[in-house]
Amino acid sequence: MPYVSPSLTTIVNSVKKAANPLGRDFNELEHLQNSVHGGDMFAMRSYERVRNILREELAKFKPNYAFVCEKNDAIPPHGNYFMINAIDGYNNFAHGNANFAISVAMIENNTIVSGVVYNPIRDEMFFAEKGSGAFKEGFRSHERIRIAGGKDVARALIGCGSDADFIGKAFALSSNVTISGTAALDLAYVAAGKLDIALLTNAEATALAAGILLVKEAGGYIFAIGQTDTRSENLRQALFGGNIFACNEAMRQKIAEIVAK
């Protein structure tokens, strides 16, 4: 069984505690679909509850760390902070669609050191710590996850954002394209080999941070779209630009050629 540090264990437990009410709330939303305003208000209260529990639990753990939870929250240029997306795939959640996740990353000195992505409905927990690999939680033991090793981009399964231009670019790469509505899960699935490529545009930094670490620790690569040299390790450029692709090294050049057009 892999070693999971006390720090990462605390983050995982905080995510699980925040997720506890979501199963009930998700089931309730199925009964509110005929009341549009009622459903919207209920979903927003669920989102706020998850966010508040995460902030409360993580503040106990790291009282001096800042929080970045919303799109317009200031990004600390230096220092230590948590990036939280309480429900990435919020529109899915609000419509009773189970494709959403809680995403939490701990960042120290501009380096993502821990990341957790959790879909509470499917009970899929992915987590990683810098330098220690990426894992999916299991009942008896944790399963180490690794990025898929395929080389044929035309046969790849691609998770894509909703930008129309980049959907076209995704189909120029492969006819196997899915649009899930959650960047965090797309990256987690690339890390786990369930997707070959994630092509994400205009994604919120809070939805990307944990997934970026998962992909890297699973042996994959993150590239900022639009760079001359796509081999970026510039966290702020890749993360806060919101436009990235994730893949293995064998597919990098072909993807870069297509997305640059």
Image (cartoon, rainbow, N blue to C red):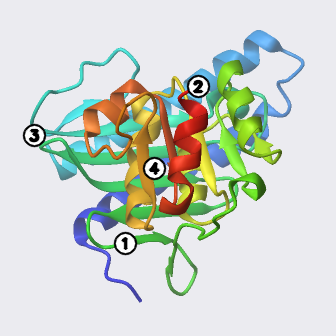
- Which residue shows up at 72% across the image and 29% down it? 167
Report the quarter where the N terminus lies.
bottom left
Q: Are marks 3 and 2 in contact (CB under 8 Å)?
A: no
Name the residue carrying label 2.
Answer: 261
Which residue occupies the extreme right position in the image? 34
Name the residue carrying label 3.
Answer: 64
Q: In the depicted view, which residue is nearer to us: 254 or 169? A: 254
**Hey, what amino acid is under mark 3?**
Asn
Q: Of the residues under marks 3 and 2, which one precedes in the sequence?
A: 3
**Hey, what amino acid is under mark 4?**
Gly
C-alpha distance separating marks 4 and 2: 26 Å
Q: Of the residues under marks 3 and 4, which one precedes in the sequence?
A: 3
**Hey, what amino acid is under mark 2?**
Lys
Q: In the depicted view, which residue is nearer to us: 165 or 114? A: 165
**Percent from the top left, x then y, of residue 226?**
43, 27
- Which residue shows up at 77% across the image and 46% down it? 174
Q: Nearer the viewer, mark 3 or mark 4?
A: 4
**Hey, what amino acid is under mark 1?**
Gly
Quadrant housing residue 113: bottom left
Q: Nearer the viewer, mark 4 or mark 2?
A: 2
Q: Of the residues under marks 1 and 2, which one precedes in the sequence?
A: 1
C-alpha distance separating marks 1 and 3: 27 Å
Is residue 32 visible in this depiction of the protein? yes
Which residue occupies the extreme top position in the image? 37
Determine whether the residue tagged by mark 4 lies in a helix, strand or loop. helix
Q: Is residue 28 left or right of residue 257?
A: right
Few, some or many C-alpha atoms within 10 Å of disc 3 (few <14, some 14-19, many ≥20)? few
Q: Nearer the viewer, mark 1 or mark 3?
A: 1
Determine whether the residue tagged by mark 3 lies in a helix, strand or loop. loop
Name the residue carrying label 4.
Answer: 211
Determine whether the residue tagged by mark 2 lies in a helix, strand or loop. loop
